[in-house]
């Protein structure tokens, strides 16, 4: 039976990292080996980590891989991906190769416009309040832009707002969507600051009460669109193309399938988002909300077959990615990932992410429509199983190969294989 712990720890956040480690170690009986892992801060100084989040006790690493073969708008890219799932990087690289034969990916330029929502409640006269907002639009925009003159000088800043009327269970509300061109930033901090600054003025103007003043992660003014032709012969022939089309139609008709379809897209996009220090939760939430925007959860990609039998794929997805500010500059590996992907703007990074998401989707659908997802996935997973079974490093490939050949990707079977190898050596 595991030891019972008491998680009510007074003043834990005030302790230095070393003291927090001692508290946790004592509470859950951490070994010296456990502590050594936690004390390995990698490329960070402990003090740096302690300023990023609360109650820090260590750091956490994931593999960084490179997706190859990408040509986007006639420019080649090496795409950094941080992900723990086997076969994802390989699938994206393969699909990108299938698209190169027909010119690669073609992505549209993306606006860097973010929405900050201002919620106005307790209004006496909704119509009059709307009219006042429109009448004083210039004043509201000016006040918002006073919060970041430098952004204005660079050509960005607040430029408009939309007014929406919502009927809720707590009565009618007006919701202002303050529209801000955040240029190369993700933009949450700047739009939140602007919304908070203009709220007292709006409250007086509308004679209402404002509660929420916060960015929306459904970035409908920042939608990335990308298209590519995937060669039928490289995909595996017309039968595979037909299989992909059937898989797509399945996803279009069924939200249960569409969820996993879109998860495959996000495998690529989130891996790049994480590598470049962007907000993975915001991107994920925005993508899935966009997939359901018409009232039915649907695929974020579309497919058709051209006159030559090739697969034509398209993706449309909101992507609020930045290349300045936040973790993109604080995290040394995020800076390095941005250097590797070699983009000059947030718009270009979003174009790369959209192409990666489309490629990831095609790579997964191709496998599903032909050999099945488990063959390639389990080939890579077998190495992890061998490690879990305690197989020495020099024998991992041999044991993993046998696991795949026998179609028994299990820890107990890996141990059996290892024992047999060791017995044979001792004969």
Image (tube, grey):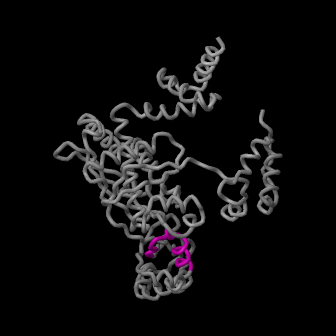
Q: Percent x, y for residue 159?
A: 41, 80
Q: Is residue 16 magenta?
A: no
Against 67, residue 422 (above or below) is: above
Q: Percent x, y for residue 23?
A: 82, 51
Q: Percent x, y for residue 413?
A: 58, 21
Q: Residue at x 53, y 49 (%)?
A: 64
Q: Residue at x 58, y 24 (%)?
A: 414
* The N terminus - image quarter: top right
Against 367, residue 340 (above or below) is: below
Against 405, residue 296 (above or below) is: below
Q: Is residue 188 magenta?
A: yes
Against 113, residue 247 (above or below) is: above
Q: Is residue 135 left or right of residue 304?
A: right
- In the orientation shown, which residue stands out farthest toward the top? 427
Q: Nearer the viewer, residue 52 or 403?
A: 403
Q: Nearer the viewer, residue 292 or 423?
A: 423
- Residue 146 seen anywhere in this rendered image of the structure: yes
Q: Nearer the viewer, residue 251 or 53?
A: 53
| Residue range of the region highlighted in magenta in the rendering | 179-196
* The C terminus - image quarter: top right
Q: Residue at x 35, y 57 (%)?
A: 316
Q: Residue at x 49, y 70 (%)?
A: 185
- In the orientation shown, which residue stands out farthest toward the left? 307
- Residue 172 seen anywhere in this rendered image of the structure: no
């Amino acid at each position: 039976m595991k030891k019972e712990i008491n998680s009510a720890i007074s003043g834990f956040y005030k302790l230095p990292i070393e003291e927090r480690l001692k508290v946790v170690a004592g509470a859950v009986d951490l070994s010296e080996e456990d502590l050594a892992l936690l004390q390995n801060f990698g490329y960070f100084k402990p003090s740096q980590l302690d300023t990023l989040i609360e109650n820090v006790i260590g750091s956490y690493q994931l593999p960084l891989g490179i997706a190859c073969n990408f040509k986007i708008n006639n420019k080649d890219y090496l795409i950094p991906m941080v992900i723990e799932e086997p076969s994802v990087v390989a699938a994206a690289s393969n699909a990108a190769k299938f698209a190169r034969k027909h010119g690669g990916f073609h992505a549209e330029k993306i606006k860097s416009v973010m929405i900050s929502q201002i919620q106005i409640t307790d209004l006496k006269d909704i119509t009059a309040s709307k009219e006042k907002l429109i009448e004083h639009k210039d004043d509201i925009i000016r006040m918002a832009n006073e919060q970041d003159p430098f952004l204005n000088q660079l050509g960005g800043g607040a430029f408009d707002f939309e007014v929406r009327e919502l009927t809720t269970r707590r009565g009618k509300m007006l919701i202002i969507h303050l529209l801000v061109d955040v240029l190369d930033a993700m933009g949450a901090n700047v739009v939140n600051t602007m919304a908070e600054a203009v709220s007292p003025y709006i409250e007086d103007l509308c004679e209402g009460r404002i509660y929420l003043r916060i960015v929306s992660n459904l970035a409908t003014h920042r939608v990335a669109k990308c298209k590519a032709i995937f060669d039928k012969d490289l995909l595996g022939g017309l039968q595979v193309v037909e299989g992909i089309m059937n898989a797509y139609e399945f996803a279009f008709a069924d939200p249960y399938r569409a969820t996993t379809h879109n998860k495959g897209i996000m495998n690529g996009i989130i891996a790049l988002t994480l590598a470049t220090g962007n907000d993975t939760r915001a991107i994920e939430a925005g993508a899935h909300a966009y997939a359901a925007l018409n009232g039915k959860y649907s695929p974020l990609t579309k497919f058709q077959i051209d006159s030559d039998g090739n697969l034509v794929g398209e993706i449309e997805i909101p992507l609020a990615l930045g290349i300045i500010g936040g973790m993109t500059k604080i995290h040394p590996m995020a800076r390095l990932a941005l250097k590797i992907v070699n983009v000059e703007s947030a718009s270009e990074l979003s174009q790369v992410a959209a192409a990666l998401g489309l490629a990831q989707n095609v790579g997964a659908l191709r496998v599903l429509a032909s050999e099945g997802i488990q063959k390639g996935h389990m080939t890579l997973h077998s190495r992890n199983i061998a490690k879990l079974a305690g197989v020495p490093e020099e024998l991992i490939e041999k044991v993993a190969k046998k696991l795949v050949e026998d179609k028994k990707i299990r820890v107990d079977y890996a141990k059996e294989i290892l024992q047999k190898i060791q017995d044979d050596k001792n004969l």
